[in-house]
Amino acid sequence: MIYINKNSLKKDYKRKFLEINGKELEDGTKEQQYEALGSLIRDYVAKEWLNTNNKYKETGEKQVYYFSMEFLLGRLLGSSLMNLGIRDICREALLELNIDLDELENLEQDQGLGNGGLGRLAACFLDSMASLNIPGHGCGIRYKYGFFEQKIIDGKQVELSDNWLRSGNVWEIQKRDKSEIVKFGGDVKMETIDGKLTFTQVNYESILAIPYDTPITGYENEVVNTLRLWSAEPVSNEFDFSSFSRGEFLKAIEYKNSVESISLVLYPEDSFYEGKILRLKQQYFFVSAGLQSIVRHYKKYNSNIYELDEKISIHINDTHPTLAIPELMRILLDEEKLSWEEAWRITQNTISYTNHTILAEALEKWPINMFKKILPRIYMIIHEINERHCKDLWNKYIGQWDKISRMAIIADGFVRMANLAIVGSHSVNGVAKLHTEILKKKEMSDFYYLYPNKFNNKTNGITHRRWLLKSNPDLANLLKETIGEGFIKHPMDLLNFEKYLSDNNVLGKLRNIKLNNKVKLSKEIYGSYGIKVDPNSIFDVQVKRIHAYKRQTLNCLRIMDLYNKLIENPNMDINPRTFIFAGKAAPGYILAKNTIELITSIANKINNDPIVKDKIKVIMMENYRVSLAEKIIPATDLSEQISTTTKEASGTSNMKFMMNGALTIATLDGANIEIKDEVKEENIVIFGLTANEVLDYHNNGGYSSWDIYNSDNRIKRIIDNLVDGTYSYDREKFRAIYDSLLKYNDEFFVLKDFDSYIRAQEIVNELYGNKLNWQRICGVNIAHSGIFSSDRTIKEYATGIWGSDVLYKNL
Ligand SMILES: *Cc1c(COP(=O)(O)O)cnc(C)c1O
């Protein structure tokens, strides 16, 4: 919250522009105008940032550090202005200078340092921590290239590099004086000094880690926390030209490139793990730099290293930062000279871990030989942790070798990161009730019975500031007019909106707001793709990473089925629908890329068929990212959350959609279950296998997709359509999808759930027929979305995991 009036803002802005560009505002480009505004806002933030840091030093409050390989922040200008409480006066000030604030906000490059839900969760958490006065900071990697930019060319995904720093980044501050050295490779020298066995790394390679800090502003509360991202550089960046022969000079450049490759690019895989050396280096790089800087800062203001766990919490977002456990041990043992027992107590108390997935293909494990070579000292420490852990297991589970080997940290030639994370932390949480139950009872049941008190649930959330206030201002205004502004600080107050849902006037306003948002999106679609869509049609939306378990194919198959029905019966009475897709496929994920081709081929066929032209349209929007999500979600009528039950740990776009007044069609997976419990059965449409049915098939078999293919004519026809030239002259084009459904027995139960999905879509159709009731349902969803604010989630983390009363004094 800063106090400034329109005229001073105008004056400051003009001065800033002149300072940066050496010319008058009117002569600048839009990009220069954006940059000057961003710099000015960062200046405004700087003072609160300093004050916040000084306050933390004075009070000695416990500090939380959220370690994550990904932070999917999106754009910062609009949200910073909003959090400072000056977005409206800034809009007015700029208008008087003939500048459109929205236009400048749209010029900002998304900060896209994440793949999807996991990275976006980290961003929502930073926002909630700052807004709840919690001293919580982010620690990650400053990738030079973020998540790739997706283009769709000839119906196929093409990946372009995301050079997001091309025109600089007004939000970050490089802190070269706070650099750290990270050590790779070499040997460990063991010697006895004063009767104590000590370990020293020798012959290692030093890499310089440079921090870049981004201010994270709280909502109108004068709190500014820090996101610290690390960038890799050679320790010495200077070349002595005279002493280099040509060969040496080139070698030096090669070396520089190899060092900088550590923070060069984000791995574009989501819920998939590949054991690449560079990825291991990335993980250790940011974890080591982050921990060294945290301990250094701690020691500057605290003399007693034994109290570190009372003053610091380190949270690891999935297993990617698990090396925080052995790295903190290394610092405490080798540098602080603590005993193993003391170091272990502090480490366990300091670290907590969130599990994000039960997909087997996402579980991280590193080959021992690779690991040892790159991180010899860290390997020794993990080895010792494992020895002690297994000794406990031997004593407890006498003779149960299978169980012990399942629970070991090092086994079968691999270091298993999830097991290390569980053993080395004091808290393990899942991200939705069902997910946590599966962790406890199935995936991690051995550990749950060993440490029942470590396991807990923290259902994910989203920041309602970005996903409602900022992205859907008209809806936010209607809420303010009806229930008042209280919900901004207390999102559970949204429940009060339910009272207004018997007021047809309010329902009419809801309808107009949605229609308006749909008109805006329609214009965007027309502008980008030249396709006219009808804002009065149902906007039926599935936007998320393209992945077999998320079942974009199921969505495709029912569109194909509907198309077949419409061709047979062009006068069929349906509500017109616009099917909107967006999402990126990992570059090496053939099936997912094939799914994009299927979507675009269906779109091509349907959008050009005059028989169905006023009834259905299919749109694949390019380059899904936070800023695009902010445009699509407020314009959505129907939210598609159709993952194979048990596979989606939580989902978070499901929450964004309901908060913006969409009806959800969903399987009973992840947080969909909790959404259903909140809004009640009649305000959501549920279909598909239950978790127990899926688990039963997994355990006992008994599913045959061929049987379904042979017994259901609709299904036979659409599956045949995949390879009969209906959607492509090249009949082999969708072979990968065809095979996954039949030859490989449909691992994700697409055909099994098809009939139930079609019937659920018919229910949606009927519901849409009653306009007032539809609006009421949308209103109920909005009213019940408060519990899915990440403010609720973060309060639960603060009280239940980070556990310090300082943390929640203000809650
Ligand atoms: C919220 C969000 C996600 C997560 O979507 P799910 O449907 O929960 O997988 C992914 N990408 C972006 C850009 C998001 O904003």
Image (cartoon, helix red, strand yellow):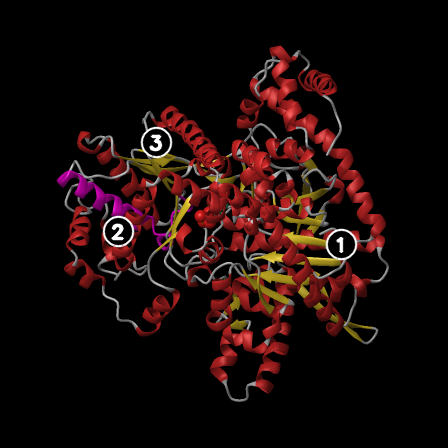
Q: Is residue 503 left or right of residue 24?
A: left
Position in image of residue 513 (x %, y %): 47, 32
The mark found on residue 536 in the picture is 3
178, 270: nearer the viewer: 270
Q: Which residue is mark 2?
A: 736
SS at circle 3: loop
Label located before the other in sequence (1 or 2): 2
**611 in relation to 99, above or below:** below
Residue positioned 54% across, 22% down in the render:
103
Q: Which residue is mark 1?
A: 809
Mark 3 packing: few (<14 Cα in 10 Å), some, or many (20+)? few
- Going by the numbered disc 1, the residue's amino acid type is Lys
Residue positioned 63% across, 41% down in the render:
488
Which residues are the magenta region? 542-569
Q: Is residue 337 left or right of residue 585?
A: right
SS at circle 1: loop
Asked whether 560 falls inside the magenta stretch, the response is yes
The mark found on residue 786 in the picture is none
Q: Is residue 594 in view from this perspective?
A: no
Position in image of residue 362 (x %, y %): 46, 59
Label located before the other in sequence (3 or 2): 3
Asked whether 742 falls inside the magenta stretch, the response is no
